[in-house]
Amino acid sequence: MSMDRRDFLKVAGISSILGFGATVASATNLITGKQLLPPQVEMNKDALRAKRWAMVVDMSKFKTDEDFQKTITACHTIHNVPDFRKPDGSVDKKFEVKWIWQTNYEKAFPGMENQYQGEHLKDMPFMVLCNHCTNPACVRVCPTKATYKLPDGVTMQDMHRCIGCRFCMAACPYGARSFNWIDPRRAANLDPAKGGKVNPEYPTRTKGVVEKCTFCTERLAVGKIPACVEAAPQGALLFGDLEDPNSEIRKIIGEKLTIRRKPELGTGPAIYYLIGGGEHA
Amino acid sequence: MLEKALEGSKKYWAWVFFLGIFALTGTYWYIRQFNEGLGLTGLHRDVSWGLYIGQFTFLVGVAASAVMLVIPYYLHDFKKFGKIVILGEFLAISAVTMCILFIFVDMGQPMRIMNVILHPTPGSVMFWDSVVLSGYLFINLLVGWVTLSSDRKGVPPPKWIKPWIYLSIPWAISIHTVTAFLYSGVPGRHFWLTAVMAARFLASAFAGGPALLIILALIVRKVSKFDAGKDVIQAVSRIVAYAMFANVFLLGLEFFTAFYSGIPGHQHPFVYLYKGMIGIDGQMHAEIVPLMWTSSVFAAISLVMLWVPAIRRKEGLLVLACIMLFVSLWIDKGFGLIIGGFVPNPFEEVNPYLPTYPETMITIGVWAVGFLVLTFLYKIAITVREQTAGVEIEH
Amino acid sequence: MKIYNKGLVFSLILVFAAIALFPFLVQGGRVAAKPDPKTDTPEIMQYAQEHGGKKECVESKEWMRGEHMQLLNQWRDSVVRDDNRGYISNTNHQRWNMSLQNGCMKCHSNKKKFCDECHNYLSVKPYCWDCHIQPAEKEEVKS
């Protein structure tokens, strides 16, 4: 068979590409001679389970600024959320990351304020976090399935898979998502060199990924309620199964007036704000 | 044919060198951004997309606009476009290249880009955008190369290329429609939640792209013997005029809906962009108001200039109109569109965004790479055309 | 035979050779010490003591050596995406908690002498530790 130089190069090029591909594909199996075992995995037996996790927020139970702070701090400490500060001690909005935070009525429910409402009503503090929507826009837009719904209703974020395109941040109507603009370990609260301390039981994130509240899936898996619920004043944050007719939150939602943020968008938020508060359960 | 990009006059190499410097500067800043993170940009949690995604959006339009030459030439047998159509196709290639680069520099974890293919998600518009963009790049490379190769040999292009050319028409429309869906499909961003988004994207693309092409064709005529033809330039300028009219009309519709309906949420982004609003720091923020008004004024002037035949026919004025139109659309779509979606944020807070120096340098760097690609491609096309000058080939 | 552009051709061959031989020149013929990962942390020793002197991992040592990267990837997806956090070993049929920080590294508390030993030798840089927090390195135990 005669072959001119051009054909030879073509064949050589194609075979080297194929050869390279095959090597990569079989690197683990052929070279080591071992197949990966089929995974045998199971859920934790003592995990808290639900058909649909949801939360009722009773703002009347948050009395002092400290009530807010200890709730937020509990979450942010456990999850190694970076706390970027400016030299003057104020929050650095440029890099800010937050999972749960305090805002006011006017901002949490834009368009619902009334003209003659007193400032104390418009400025009434509200606790906000990811709404773990039934029909979340963030999940719909994610190009890699890095954010997705767990069967128990939690909107989960896989920080291993996130490519940092931030489409989810554009899609979320609740501003619940934060991006790691720089390495979160540079924040004073996580950097040992700056007197910071990490929770060794939980990872930090890397730069370039999106993060948000996960309803503490890692705690639910070992039978613990979310950190914010545990740290908040008694009855301020109620966590339970919306699909269980006997759950406490279901009873409250059935009998008292609750509102949700931007329900008209059809996202189906699972955080219910109790109006009036007072005695319940 | 590639070798034709490797031989040229001193001026040619000076231009390549000039672009190369900006490309390298951009690369330097990108390496820093890669190491330090997107914190190098002016973006923050409230405005999480900015200049990069704006440029991407704008350039998808430039890429799609090649179809405005392909349709008359291949569908309506408008023979005069025979020379300029290759310029349109090559402009599309360089524009798509820039689009891909802008997406890449905007990613937080660029090393994970293959996740889009490893975990394909047909429900995500972003996934489809990457599919249609790479497809469009492929089609234009194929069509541009095959037709130009045939021209060089003085033979008509092979028959099998025709279906690809016809495919490029709906494909061009699809890339910009899908890009519009990135915005108009998300809830809770009043400025973006509009059904005319895709229509307006196409209108502005079909104005901005051909306007750029007129400028480029006139530059090409200056620096080479390649002349697209005076009447061809005029024909393209009419396309620009009609498309720009449609774009301004559609923008007017947005204003009407926002202000006549009286819904505050719909009005806020317009108020922020054109008047300014009080920010979370208690200060008035009107930083981009002058830009937006520049865009509006340029749009109006350029539209009038293009509309009046006496002005349009003078090529000096035509270029001026095209430059103003291009700048106007660049501000409107490459910047205002993104900012308006994020400010005010979902809490109706105004937390402004302005690009930083590194971000600007990276943006200029990507444009420089795009123009390098364009320069090489045009150099090839021009050289081929100069050699076959006078020979008319039936396509 | 006439060679065109002799100067250019030979100088580029030299440049190529310099690049190709760079690693050898830098290494200077020295041989890097063979990696010797240690499994003698207090935690493992205590486990062995409680289990009749037997050191046990989720799978056999040999299998883990070749496949731990795939296993960790599998674990990651299982935990994060399916909420399945228990792994049943094919070797010892025990249930292990699938967690890098709260599983693996609880026993292998010596990242430097366990993970880095081989990874450095092979010049691989897994990015696990960009997010996951490594255990505090203890003082080396004198044997």
Image (cartoon, rainbow, N blue to C red):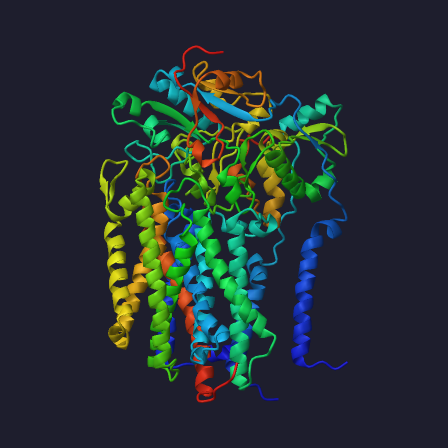
Q: Quadrant of residue B365?
A: bottom left
In terms of depth relative to the viewer, which is nearer, B3 or A152?
Answer: A152
From the viewer's perspective, is B120 left or right of B380? right
In terms of depth relative to the viewer, which is nearer, A142 or B100?
Answer: A142
Q: Position of residue B7 (x, y in %)?
A: 44, 81
In terms of depth relative to the viewer, which is nearer, B258 or C55?
Answer: B258
* Total number of numbered discs in the rendering: 0
Q: Position of residue B310 (x, y in %)?
A: 24, 75
Q: Is residue B222 above or below residue A32?
A: below
Q: Is residue C33 above or below residue A11?
A: above
Q: Residue furthest front?
A: B260
From the viewer's perspective, is B253 left or right of A225? left
Camera sees residue C5: no
Q: Position of residue C102 (x, y in %)?
A: 59, 29
From the viewer's perspective, is B269 left or right of A189? left
Camera sees residue A270: yes
Q: Position of residue B258 (x, y in %)?
A: 32, 44
Q: Is residue B370 above or below residue B385?
A: above
